[in-house]
Image (cartoon, rainbow, N blue to C red):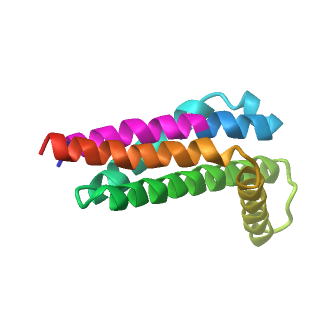
Amino acid sequence: MPTAARLIAAIFMAGTGIILALELRGLRESLKHFAFFIEYNALLGAIVGWKLVGNRVGHGWARAAAAGISGGFVTLMLVVFSLAFREMLNRAFRKFYDHALEALLAALKIGITDFLAISATVAILPVFMGAVLSGLGAEAAERRWR
């Protein structure tokens, strides 16, 4: 059922996805040539905001902020590991791996490396702030438009 809280959460998490895309582009040079990278991250953020954050608001401000943080973490994980899987597919088509398990383990390694690179820098702060604002904005919409 569409609600205002879900819509606001989807819009704010899409903005968080855009922020995440811009931060990741600064960390990896290969992402500067990925055609729909910003749109892809915005779509993932909007889906997470609609499905995860929008459903979990309406129980207070602290729980809404926690829902936003968990939505931001899920968005970060989806983006990082889908990009790692994409990088693994690019390498696999160039015959970089001998076996399928080696390719999957390489995708996991790439994803963990990218996650640690973004979480070890100050680049994670705007993503965290956008996630909290997503939860709080959805809570405000839930209280205003029941």
Q: Residue at x 78, y 40 (%)?
A: 27
Magenta segment includes 120: no
- Residue 92 location (% of width, % of height): 79, 54
Q: Nearer the viewer, residue 106 or 139?
A: 139
Please tell me whether residue 18 is drawn above or below residue 143 in the rendered image: above
Please tell me whether residue 109 is drawn above or below residue 54 in the rendered image: below
Residue 46 figure quarter = top left
Q: Nearer the viewer, residue 132 or 13?
A: 132
The furthest residue to the left:
146
Q: Nearer the viewer, residue 97 or 128?
A: 128
The furthest residue to the front:
61
Please tell me whether residue 87 is drawn above or below residue 116 in the rendered image: above
Q: Residue at x 72, y 46 (%)?
A: 122
Q: Residue at x 32, y 55 (%)?
A: 61
How many numbered badges does the structure rendering display? 0
Please tell me whether residue 38 is drawn above or below residue 123 in the rendered image: above
For the magenta stretch, what is the residue range? 4-19
Residue 123 figure quarter = top right
Q: Residue at x 70, y 40 (%)?
A: 24
Q: Is residue 19 visible?
A: yes
- Residue 135 location (% of width, % of height): 37, 49
Query: Is 102 placed left or right of 71 in the picture?
Result: right
Query: Is 119 placed left or right of 143 in the picture?
Result: right
Magenta segment includes 5: yes
- Residue 59 location (% of width, % of height): 24, 61
Query: Is 96 placed left or right of 22 in the picture?
Result: right
- Residue 117 location (% of width, % of height): 78, 53
Q: Is residue 2 visible?
A: no
Rendered-image quadrant of the C terminus: top left
Q: What type of secondary structure mainly makes up the magenta span?
A: helix
Residue 12 figure quarter = top left
